[in-house]
Image: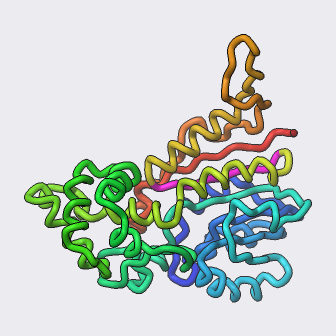
Amino acid sequence: MTGPVNGHVPVMLNEVLQTLRPRDGEHYVDGTFGGGGYTRAILEAADCRVLGIDRDPDAIARGQKLVEHFAGRLTLVHGEFSNVASYLGDAKTNGIVLDLGVSSFQFDEPERGFSFRENGPLDMRMSREGGSAADFVNTADEKTIADVIYRLGEERNSRRIARAIVAKRPITGTAELADIVKQAQGPAAARLAIHPATRTFQALRIHVNDELGELDRTLEASLDVLAAGGRLVVVSFHSLEDRMVKQFLTARSTSAPAASRHAPDTRRAHMAAFRLITKSPLTPGDTEVEGNPRARSARLRAAERLAA
């Protein structure tokens, strides 16, 4: 089985391949190229072609060795998956795989500012464009910061943390922010099973990169580019993402009738677009979690595109 790519360990790789079912002569899209783990495995599993997309320019630069290795079979694009239709043109794809987690490279490079394990600039931008996490925490009002931390981080102490952030501004480093959050949690921080800043950092990262908005646009885009029989495979890592994927696939695997003029309904009428492959999400096995703790929260959902 394919091993790590440049130190990157793809999560639930066996399950992804078994669900995607790469075949000779077909075309696939790795919508979150990252370290290239899924892409390499797909290209090794079948004589097929892959379009890899990533909004992190560093990921595209690292992937050039794979482009050379799989000459003519791999194309990399710097951009967002929600724009996949423009990258494919009039072509359709036989399968899409999405890993919604943060790349190991982004977590492990302090200068990217995604992690509080080592001090670095408070950045968190996947694309290296737009406003950073530092820009947000140093300019947004207390209520806005609290709302983001509560909604996207599911952090119960969001108001207390936001108040502490505003009181300590300006904040420029990850270690500084992590310490502020820990202090704001008070004595309860010592009883938490995770680092007290985990949920706050998650919330800021999701907000800065508009991850939920991009996921929503990405799921809708998959409808237009998947060929009949093509498969959508999504690996998510926290409840907000998993809930969105579940709701989308559930809604799109059933038909919605047109609203009656006597009973107006804001829902759009549509025919079922997918057949669910996973009624419940697949999860990583104990062996994988022991070898790669980052996999512990992974959930895989998949569906097959029906004929339009």
Q: Which residues are magenta?
A: 229-237
- In x, y percent, where is residue 21? 74, 55
Quadrant assignment, res 148: bottom left
Give the answer, above or below, for where 242 lies relative to 276. below
At horizontal 69% and vertical 71% (from top left) the residue drawn is: 53
Q: Would residue 2 be visible to someone looking at this image?
A: no
At horizontal 27% and vertical 78% (from top left) the residue drawn is: 170
Quadrant assignment, res 133: bottom left
Q: Main secondary structure of the magenta part?
A: strand
Q: Would residue 9 be visible to someone looking at this image?
A: yes
- In x, y percent, where is residue 91? 89, 60
At horizontal 73% and vertical 53% (from top left) the residue drawn is: 221
Give yes or no for residue 82 being in the magenta stretch.
no
Give yes or no for residue 231 being in the magenta stretch.
yes
Q: Nearer the viewer, residue 273 or 202?
A: 202
Left or right, 35 with respect to 289, comes to right
- In x, y percent, where is residue 31? 67, 64
At horizontal 88% and vertical 64% (from top left) the residue drawn is: 89
Q: Nearer the viewer, residue 82 or 27?
A: 82
- In x, y percent, where is residue 291? 41, 68
